[in-house]
Amino acid sequence: MADTALELRTIALTAGAPSRPRHGLRDRPSQLPTDEAGVMARRLTLGYVTGLGLLAAATLGGSWLINNALTHRAYDATIINQAGAQAMLSQRIASLALMKANGGSADHDHATAELPKAVARMAASHVNLSRIANNPHLGSPDLMTHYFTGETPLDLQVTRFLQQVRNLEGDAAQARAVSQDALDVLLPRLAEAVALHEDAAKGRADRIAMLHKAIVGLALALMLAEAIIIFRPLVRRTVSMTAQLKREACTDPLTGLMNRRAVIEALTETLPHHTSVAVVAIDLDHFKRTNDTDGHAAGDAMLRAAAERLRATVRDSDLIGRIGGDEFLVFLFGIATETEVMEVAQRMRDALHLPVPHNGRLLRLGATLGVAIAPTDTDEVEGLLRAADEALIRTKRAARGKVGRVTRDDVARTRRDASILRALTATDIDKLPGFTAHLQPIIDLADGKVRGVEALARWTSEELGPIPPDEFFAAAQKLGLAAALSEAARGHAMAAFAKLRREGLDLGRLQINVSAPELMRDDMVDAFERQCRTHGLALSDITVEITEDVLLDRVSHTTLDRLCDLRARGVLLSLDDFGTGTSGLLQLLRLPLDEIKLDRSFVSRLGVDERARQIVEGTIRMAQSMRLAVVAEGIEDEAREQDLRNLGSAKGQGWLYAPAMPVDALRDWLKAHAPQRETAMAQDRHLPAA
Ligand code: C2E
Ligand code: CA
Ligand code: CA
């Protein structure tokens, strides 16, 4: 059972690990096939790169256009200037011609010198402008018409005008006619040419601007296309893949149920929103055997069947998780009463007990269930899970295949146990905070003198306050720490005992409880003696109290040897709890005893139960005949003391005299109650002299 529980826990812990799951679970079923993913990735990359290339081309084209537009603008400005300059030149030529014909000799000379230059400039400009007018890319149809077609094209007019000027021979009338002609006819035509050049430049600029707009539009369209064709599917794919991964991380692939982490997360999230939640922890019975003997396929079939049946038994709003190899958790929400919860759990149990058909055979299925309810048991997640687990473990131990439940008390006890175990393991056991030993006097019933003190371990835990020795020893036993803890108690007791003795107080013998695990240590006797010496005591100062369970184990003869060895070195042996199930008559034959301690249960019934009186009387007689001392335990009142004295018990111990006390209280008690200084041993008729 313990092995199975441990194994289950191991499986539960490793369930989330990515390694290949146990019990022949399949690989994850719904992964994207690798080549499909590859094709998709390649397609996306191609689309992305193409889109980016086109965008880059559009950007470069736009920038080239803007450069081009700027260059053209400068060029156009030059042309327009040049065209404007033609008008001024024609006027200047006309006035120079007049000056040459009519002017004085100085003017004549000046005009004669300047006229050819002006004519040459105008001619050169004209050649340039008419070439532009003739170029379909730089000019315009109107310019072409203006310069070269119609009755009097500008080209012809200018050529003729320049020719006329060149032909002037100083005839004043002729010069006047030419210049008049220039002002009246040529000048408006030149002005018109300027306007047409301006129109052509503007037309070109408009065309470039339009082209630029088209490119910007194209780039925007590309970006839009990229977003629609590339990014939208990419984002969708990423979102769906993330969701799928998340789903896979939360799901048990075999059953499709939530896995441990997911189901506990879901509970943590939902618990605050519900007034009542029941947790059912389920463990399949016989699963491991089926899995081992019939194969993993059979195991898988059982798990799948269990999952389906659980799904069919609860509401859709309830949660089911597979949290380990064959462990499931179910959370039932909003069920009002405990009876109803137990009914649902019972239905689950019944469903899980139907056999599972597999390969033409019927596999035997069974399950044990543990139930915990919030807020009845506890209202926090961890406690709830622990309570359900506890219920499951207890039920499995007591009645496998049933539904079990733990109470609030069980939960509290479990928590307390856990706290004790935690505290015991938190530090070295011999430095356990709040741990010590108290001493309880053992009294001679004849004269009231102290014959010994029994060392009793005491522990006040920081978290839980005082804890009874039976409880903390049982916990220490689980951890294999009982012997060490008892040794620590002994150390405290020896120190206190030695201290009081050094102060001159006589305490008789120190009575030490020794349990079975302590006697198993090979070096027990030597260690015991060393411990005594450390505190300045001898083994002959000690009485060891044992119960019969020290001889119950398989190595009882070694234990017996050890007890004999101790006794040979001066220790007295006392049989504790005499008359109870754990210490009986048989031990009187087997053990080399000096004393028996009559159990409290007999003492407390004296005067109430005649048979108890007879047993006590018989026991004391028998002890006397075997020369064994008798200590009556648990004397709480004077009537009991008187009875025992009448029946012949030599010594007694109990709250009538004193409880177990720390060293200072014991010192005070000794001073108040036992001022006599005689040695206890000399007075004790029943004990052999040490
Ligand atoms: P025990 O050896 O039988 O110890 C006697 C128990 O009776 C003690 O309980 C003591 O406190 C209690 N007692 C004494 N006088 C009276 C009385 O008048 N009335 C009642 N009702 N009880 C009385 P305690 O201290 O709870 O110890 C329980 C058991 O724990 C002990 O039973 C002993 O078996 C074990 N134990 C205690 N200290 C040690 C230790 O240091 N080492 C080992 N191995 N066991 C220890
Ligand atoms: Ca005892
Ligand atoms: Ca006892």
Image (cartoon, rainbow, N blue to C red):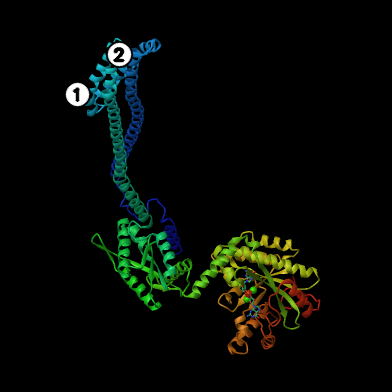
Tell me the number on the disc at residue 172. Answer: 2
Q: Position of residue 182 (x, y in %)?
A: 28, 21
Q: Amino acid at mark 1?
A: Thr
Q: Quadrant of residue 293?
A: bottom left
Q: Is label 1 or label 2 in front?
A: 2
User: Do the residues under discs 1 and 2 have CB atoms within 8 angstroms?
Assistant: no
| Residue topped by disc 1 | 149
Q: Quadrant of residue 488?
A: bottom right
Q: Quadrant of the C terminus?
A: bottom right
- Residue placed most toward the observer, 673 or 233: 233
Q: Quadrant of the N terminus?
A: bottom left
Task: Name the quadrant where ligand 2 sits.
Answer: bottom right
- Residue placed most toward the observer, 62 or 340: 62
User: Mark 2: which secondary structure?
Assistant: helix
Q: Does residue 338 appear to the left or right of 40 in the view shown?
A: right
User: Mark 1: which secondary structure?
Assistant: loop
Number of callouts: 2
Q: Is residue 187 visible?
A: yes
- Residue placed most toward the observer, 16 or 630: 16
Q: Does residue 117 appear to the left or right of 9 in the view shown?
A: left
Q: What crowding class fits label 1: few (fewer than 14 Cα within 10 Å), some (14-19), or many (20 or more)?
A: some
First in sequence: mark 1 or mark 2? 1
Q: Residue at x 78, y 79 (%)?
A: 672
Determine whether 21 is above or below 113 in the image.
below
Q: Position of residue 469 (x, y in %)?
A: 61, 71
Q: Position of residue 640 (x, y in %)?
A: 66, 86
Q: Amino acid at mark 2?
A: Ala
Q: Residue at x 34, y 51 (%)?
A: 241
